[in-house]
Amino acid sequence: MSNDKGFTEEQKQFLSGFAFGTDVARAVSGLPVLSNSAGGGVNGESITIGAKAEDVLPVGPEKIALIAQRETKESGKQLCKEELAKLEKNPLDMWDEMQARSDKGEFPKGTDVFLQKFHGLFYVAPAQNSFMCRMRIPGGLLHAWQLTGLADLSDRSAGGYIDVTTRANLQYREIPADQAMNILYGLRELEIVNLGAGGDNIRNCTASPLSGIDTIELIETIPLAKRMHHYILNSREMYGLPRKFNIAFDGGGTISSLDDTNDIGFHAVSVSAENASAEFPEGVYFQLTLGGITGHKDFARPTGVLLRPDQCLAVAGAIVRVFVKHGDRTDRKKARLKYVLDDWGFDKFIAAVEEQLGYTLPRLDESKLTKSLVENRMAHIGFHPQAQTGKQYVGVVLPVGRITSDQARSLADIATKYGNGEIRLTVWQNLLIPNIDDANVEAVQQALLEIGLDYRASQFRAGLVACTGSGGCKFAAAETKTHAMILADHLQAQFDLDLPINIHLTGCHHSCAQHYIGDIGLIGCKVEKGDDMVDGYHVHLGGGWGERQGIARLIFESVAFEEMPNLISAVIQGYIEQRNDGETFVDFTARKTDDELKSLAAMSPV
């Protein structure tokens, strides 16, 4: 071919994109770059040496992120090191590189540690000299054959156990360097694609775990979470974010998906005949909320936008694209959607989303919406009737979210023999087995007890949430999972409550266990004891979600864990003695001053 007339338009676009990628790599390395200028080349222009990468027009699905990076630099700001790493190497194109490292039995170094998280692989040294692998289980729905396969894969290539996370998801730990690719291939063979499970990406999409079987839900949400999952996997633009992003669907049923803690929340509501109109006929819709990030002390807030179920995916995609274009790429602490909303306000942000979509989003005053207010905080534990006559589901208690491979295989067998082969994960670090015949309840009870698990829980264990802790995370300041079990044992030996109290233990400021929304929220710290620094916690009281929404207040600081059981016992004893009839813990703390709550430490536990 002698000139560009020999190239198709598709070939021109490919070559232009290839040239831009080369330019970016050379520019980051400080080398002169190739750029189009008048005279010839792909589009009738010659290629010259010395042009700037900023002068090259980005093409392809990644262009909105590349343009955002370029505009940040042009404004005189400095990209943070993670943005520079993504600019130098596209983390989605590391498969061969990861395979080569795995073949050599090597862990990543430098910025590759960050970039490899885009494939769900976290090198967690110095806590463990191994990988953690996070999966993507859309809507938390698994099948028995998948759980069996995951157990076998864990035995071959990981630690022989599986962790359930607070996003109704699963994780492996203790993965040797030479097993990294066996894990990634093994997951895909089980139809689990975990691309984007870590790094600056949209995390596992959550939904109501009782979707389709709830006796009171307004609408099924697992199908929407699954569609959202595949939309993300197949849209490269969804991988150019400045920071991680969470999406949740809540069907207005018995078990919350904690949608108000997500960047995007879709919460089911209904419009009655009385409030119906031509634009909003009587029926079920989703209220759009934005900006939830409880680790930064904020919940998702209503936008006024009301959507049909078939509108949710497109709107979510547009929201993400606006965030990609305008999120902060200089300061990781401010690189979440909340800060764009704080800076712009909701009206400006929604206007940008509408511009992205090309149409105006429908709005309806919140006073005309009917919400479900029947959440049951114990519904994820024990046996409960389903919407289907003669059927029950069981919520299985998993001690701080961990099961052995043998237990996982046994749970899969129970789900197959007594259910329909489904397993549903929850944001409370446990799982549900649905579609059990009434006649088989006793058999399932016995089967669970025989494998060392239970369907019963105290009012403390039912709401016990703990992150990985210092045993598996380099950021954590305390061994949260071990401490959670000690604390639960101590409390349930002393108290028999009529109302649940949620206790959340998180190891660091990342707040993976969402300590700010716990009735009692503990965040790890180091406490000086003589010549030693020991594990301890800052203690927050009075958090909640949904209709009990609130950020827990810091009441006790730097308490060594050895003092924690007696302190929490005293607080609960004070609650029991001073509460009003039927008063919840969050309502009790809301009417108490900080000083009054601090005085509870002097109470004598029973």
Image: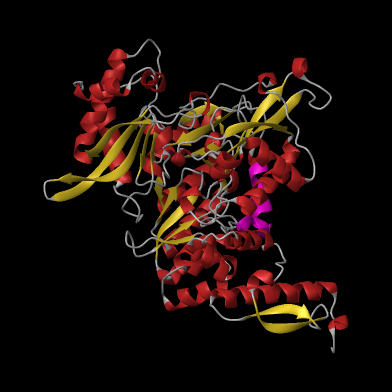
The residue nearer to you, when weighing 214 against 341, is 341
Q: Residue furthest front?
A: 76
Residue 50 pos. (x, y %): 64, 81
Locate the N terminus by quadrant: bottom right
Left or right placement of residue 135 versus residue 476 in this view: right
Q: How many marks?
A: 0
Left or right placement of residue 225 versus residue 178 in this view: right
- Residue 520 is a magenta residue: no
Image quarter for residue 502?
top left
Residue 205 pos. (x, y %): 59, 45
Establish if 149 lies above or below 7. Answer: above
Locate the C terminus by quadrant: top left
Establish if 555 lies above or below 431. Answer: above
What's the residue at 70%, 19% (across, down)? 368
Establish if 528 lies above or below 362. Answer: below
What's the residue at 80%, 75% (across, down)? 12
Q: In the rendered structure, which segment of residues is drawn in magenta?
A: 224-240
Specify the color scheme.
Answer: secondary structure
The residue nearer to you, when weighing 170 against 292, is 292
What's the residue at 24%, 39% (across, down)? 558
What's the residue at 70%, 44% (across, down)? 352
Image quarter for residue 577?
top left
Residue 431 pos. (x, y %): 49, 40
